[in-house]
Amino acid sequence: MKYILENPVAGTIGLVKYQCTLQWRNGKIIADEPPSSGGGDQGPDPHSLLASAVASCALITMRMYIDRKGWNIPQLQVNVNMYQEKVNEKLTTIIDRDIVFDEGVPEDQKLKLQEIANLCPISKILENDIKLRTFIFKTGETKTIKYANDEITVLWKPAFCQHSTRCWKQLPQVFNPSIQKWIDPNGAPAERVAEQVKRCPSGALTFLYPSDQPGKPVQPV
């Protein structure tokens, strides 16, 4: 398992309704709700952010194709909106993406770019199966099993495990759920084991170095 993003987008919210700060790999984005929903409208709302992903991915993909072909299309625009309809208790979301060309673009190039827009990565995500998983990081005292060598001790709290599968899919030489003693800290360097443990979103996995004193668990990265 390899995530698409090298680092996750991290969102935080304080007491200002309903302003969120979204940290991405090279900066911050503010998301908010409009005044009609009680927000301050200081940034795009979540639906607008989704629409922005659909628009920007199509534009980037089309621009790559245009440049590769050497076509004379200096600018193009994509408008995105969405609506929902419920039929037989099933809710369906329809996302409309309109491509707007300047005058003079040949019809065959328009049709080809329509096809290319539908092949952009975000389109492929939305048009195939999507599973949304939500994890929470737990702390507290519960049964803890230790797996140790001279360089690192991995602590596992079975009651906290939410089975994100990040551990064994990303570092199978250390984590193998098909056997009883499923964590082998000798399977990778201690630094790599620690890095993987930090990715656990549930608090089920933590670690200690020999010189460490037990402290608060490391939040996932």
Image (spheres, rainbow, N blue to C red):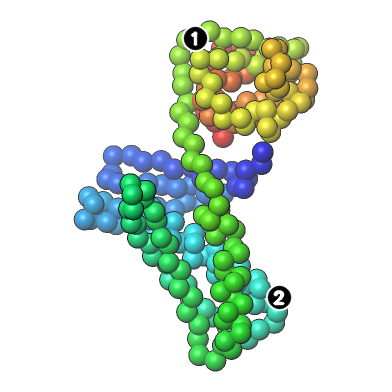
Viewed as shown, does residue 14 lie left or right of 177? left
Residue 156: x and y in percent read: 59, 15
Tell me the kind of residue under disc 2. Arg
For the point 52% across and 65% down, which residue is it? 56
Image height of 36 relative to 132, above or below: below
Viewed as shown, does residue 104 lie left or right of 47? right
Label 1 Cα neighbours within 10 Å, binned few <14 / some 14-19 / many ≥20 = few
Label 1 with label 2: CB-CB less than 8 Å: no
For the point 52% across and 46% down, which residue is it? 130
For the point 63% across and 25% down, which residue is it? 197
Label 2 Cα neighbours within 10 Å, binned few <14 / some 14-19 / many ≥20 = few
* Label number found at residue 142: 1
Question: Which residue was labeled with disc 2?
Answer: 68
For the point 49% across and 47% down, which residue is it? 23
Q: Nearer the viewer, residue 137 or 163?
A: 163
Residue 65: x and y in percent read: 66, 73
Say which element carries label 1.
loop
Say which element carries label 2.
helix
